[in-house]
Image (tube, helix red, strand yellow):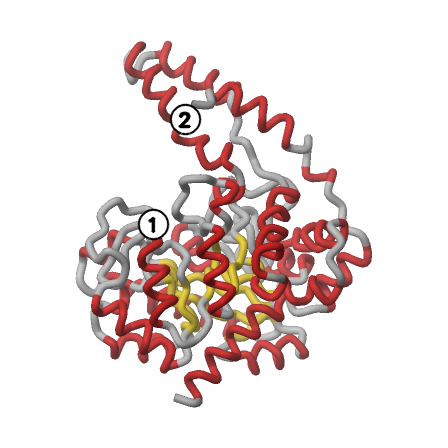
Amino acid sequence: MVSAVSLAVTAALQTPVNAEEYKASERAVQLAQENMLIDTHIDVPYRLTEHWEDVTKATASGDFDYPRAVAGGLNVPFMSIYIPAQLEQTPGASKQLAHQLIDSMEALAWRAPDKFAMAYDVADVEEQFEQGLISLALGMENGSPMEGDMANLKEFYDRGIRYITLSHSLSNHIADSSYDIRRQWDGLSPFGKELVKEMNNIGMMIDISHVSDDAFWQTLEISEAPVIASHSSLRRYTPGFERNMSDDMIKALGENGGVIMINFGSTFVTQAANRYRDMINQQIEQVKEKYGEESEEAKSRIAELQKDNPFPFATLEQVLDHIDHVVKLIGIEHVGIGSDYDGVGDSLPVGLKDVSTYPNLVQGLLDSGYSEADIKKILNENLLRVWREVENYAANH
């Protein structure tokens, strides 16, 4: 097992001193500004329920606000209608929160019609891009608001939800979760299997981020339209972390015509970051056990331990490794951006700390030899292709 000390040394070797080492060229900034840039997972709605700020203006906290989005070239953030997994235990609670979060995004667009507009289809985002507006598309993170009733799928589609992440941190009535050791369905529930079919029929993208491996394979077997992973990265770089996707899964996703949107959170990007909290928490528990949980000696030693072993932030280059590997496995047509801004706390990579920093990613792609045509695919064309195919399937069935 790697010690926390060696973890810190590894991080020091891998992490640039500060984010100022990343500076996008005029060409990279221009590519980000002139092309539609889609990010399929930004957790602004739930962030604002916990600490409201006016994101139409510069904010003191968080990863997203209007000025930073404009600076980064972000045109189409899929705002995450995130529903905590434990709410499913209270009938009606998941559905109520989902409607409230959707209301908050509609209110945002209504308050600043010169900056934001709701987006319900590909035509909307294309038209609003031409108008210079930021399109607020909606994805539901956790399908628990379905509450076992297919009528709720139609209700939320009508409210603008355009993808549903089938489960989240716990297994729910739709699918098992990659984070939950209880596998009550061995994949999808009977209702979940019907839901996948109905999502195809209604024109809702299916998101397989968070689900168990069995649920992923069953979803691909059932779905007649391409699926997405709205904010996942690669298990190749985080062995044993089921929340990320294996090479075999990525290959199957490519055959399905789908797209994996890369999560920027350091714990999704590197093994050191992924294991850090378990390791540091284990050492903290040992200190508490030895010196007493509330003792001054324990507090002093824990503070010293944390100071000597800072969180090993990933780097922009390591995020690029994930993109490169997908491209090598299944081609440039199947990868995009699903940052998880405002959803992963203080774990974002050096060089990609908020929505103003997408040009740094574009610069990294240019430096890695990607053509402008390839970069456009990553920024928007791959996701738009899937979205159109999902729309077309529904229109023809």
Q: Which residue is at a point 57% across and 52% down the rendered structure image? A: 59
Q: Which residue is at a point 33% across and 53% down the rendered structure image? A: 212
Q: Which residue is at a point 27% across and 55% down the rendered structure image? A: 176
Question: Disc number at residue 1?
Answer: none
Query: How far across and how far down the image is residue 66, in percent?
Result: 60, 61
Binning the other alpha carbons within 10 Å of mark 1 as few (below 14), some (14 to 19) or many (20 upward) gives many
Query: How far across and how far down the image is residue 86, in percent?
Result: 25, 52
Depth check: 205 or 306 in front? Answer: 205
* Residue beneath disc 1: 178
Q: Are marks 2 and 1 in contact (CB under 8 Å)?
A: no
Res 129 quadrant in image: bottom right
* Residue beneath disc 2: 279
Depth check: 392 or 67 in front? Answer: 392
Cα separation, mark 2 vs mark 1, equals: 21 Å
* Numbered disc 2: secondary structure: helix
Quarter of the rendering occupied by the C terminus = bottom left
Amino acid type at image mark 2 = Met
Res 332 quadrant in image: bottom right
Binning the other alpha carbons within 10 Å of mark 2 as few (below 14), some (14 to 19) or many (20 upward) gives some
Depth check: 376 or 124 in front? Answer: 376
Q: Is residue 127 left or right of residue 346?
A: right
Q: Is residue 197 above or below residue 235?
A: below
Amino acid type at image mark 1 = Ser
Query: How far across and how far down the image is residue 383, in percent?
Result: 55, 69
Q: Is residue 217 left or right of residue 315?
A: left
Query: How far across and how far down the image is residue 158, in percent?
Result: 37, 80
Q: Is residue 293 above or below residue 259?
A: above
